[in-house]
Amino acid sequence: MGVQRTFASVAWADKKKITRRERFLAEMNAVIPWAALVALIEPHYPRPKRGRPPMPIETMLRIYFLQQWFDLSDPAAEDGLYDSESMRRFAGLELSDDAIPDETTILRFRHLLEEHRLTERLFEAVRGLLEEKGLLLKAGTIVDATILSAPSSTKNASRQRDPEMKQARKGKMWYFGMKVHAGTDRRGLVHSLATTDAAQADITQLPRLLHGEESALYGDKAYWKEEDRELCEASGIRYRVNRRAAPHRPLSERWRQINRARSRVRARGEHAFHVVKRLWGFSKVRYRGLAKNTTRVFTAFALANLYLVRYQLGARRAQCLS
């Protein structure tokens, strides 16, 4: 990477205001374990040969993360690097002496992560870091699910909707897409993930969301099952799933109050969903099929975990990139 700054870059560095984007990128740069993540990708990355050398792994990983935070397609990511000085500084690029990766290079890096399922390992590496720092608690698990919408139109080359996405009803509304199932600790940090089409019942993924060391289990009414309650109690696990009313037998006022108390804890499990879907715009899938979108899911929630505890990891002292 070059160190020679353009006149525009020097002028940008001397500006009076630090933007929210700059501050955000500086904080995330400070808390992401770059060396560990690069080491996971390196064995699968193309080796330099004769001709033009490949872009550095860390540069491509930084661009890939920018795509998650700002919901950028591959062409939009290339345009963003040309348009935004703050993005270029985060990626470590200079217009004067560095080649900006084109959309094909960005796409190939994304395909590399998909082919080798490396984002699952990135998620595990971040989870391991949080456990090591004592930030990820194992005393209790909150389970929840959210729907990511997919295009329902058939006006495409195949003249059909994505066959791996399904339709599901939530309340009085119908949704077409996929579900992300998450198991979090009581602070809302995600430790387990699973993806299915939207028609799958939440409770079917419960075993995949438990780490096995829980002392308490929280969930909404979709996870209530009498057999599970009995099994948890026999295993010494406090079953704190919101109770569901039986047919023609509404819940008593006492149980409604208990459900409300449990929901105050359970609501923390939605913090990561808020970050990924509302702050970063990942409420709709970009690709066809579950596999490609699952790759993005693992990346997004690994970054969301770091975002939620960024100040505990020292991001408050982060300096803006220069």
Image: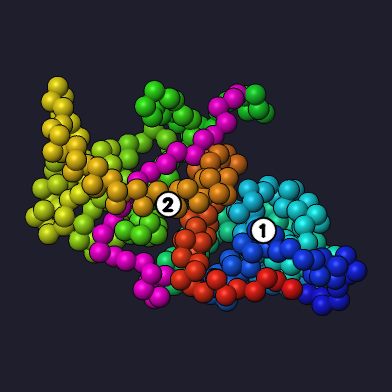
- Residue at left 28%, top 42%? 220
- Using the image, tell me which numbered label, if any, was put on residue 21: 1
Whether 141 is among the magenta residues is yes
Q: Tag 2's secondary structure? A: helix
Left or right? Give the position of 206 relative to 279. left
Q: Tag 1's secondary structure? A: helix
Colour mode of the rendering: rainbow
Q: How many marks?
A: 2
One can see residue 302 in this view: no
Left or right? Give the position of 93 relative to 266. right
> Residue 236, how many percent across, how many down?
12, 59
Whether 131 is among the magenta residues is yes
Farthest residue, direction right: 7
Q: In which quarter of the image is the C terminus?
A: bottom right
- Residue at left 81%, top 56%? 82
Q: Quadrant of the N terminus?
A: bottom right
> Residue 286, how many percent across, how many down?
60, 41
Residues 85 and 39: in front is 85
One can see residue 148 in this view: yes
Residues 304 and 256: in front is 256
> Residue 109, how many percent across, how many down?
66, 59
Q: How crowded is mark 1: few (under 14 residues within 10 Å), some or many (20 or more)?
A: few
- Using the image, tell me which numbered label, if any, was put on residue 257: none
Region in magenta: 130-154
Is 34 rendered above or below residue 196? below
Is 243 rendered above or below residue 61? above
- Residue at left 42%, top 35%? 198
The residue singled out by tag 2 in the image is 271
Give the residue type at disc 2: His
Q: Earlier in the sequence, mark 1 or mark 2?
A: 1
Mark 1 to mark 2 CA distance (whole Å): 21 Å
Give the residue type at disc 1: Arg
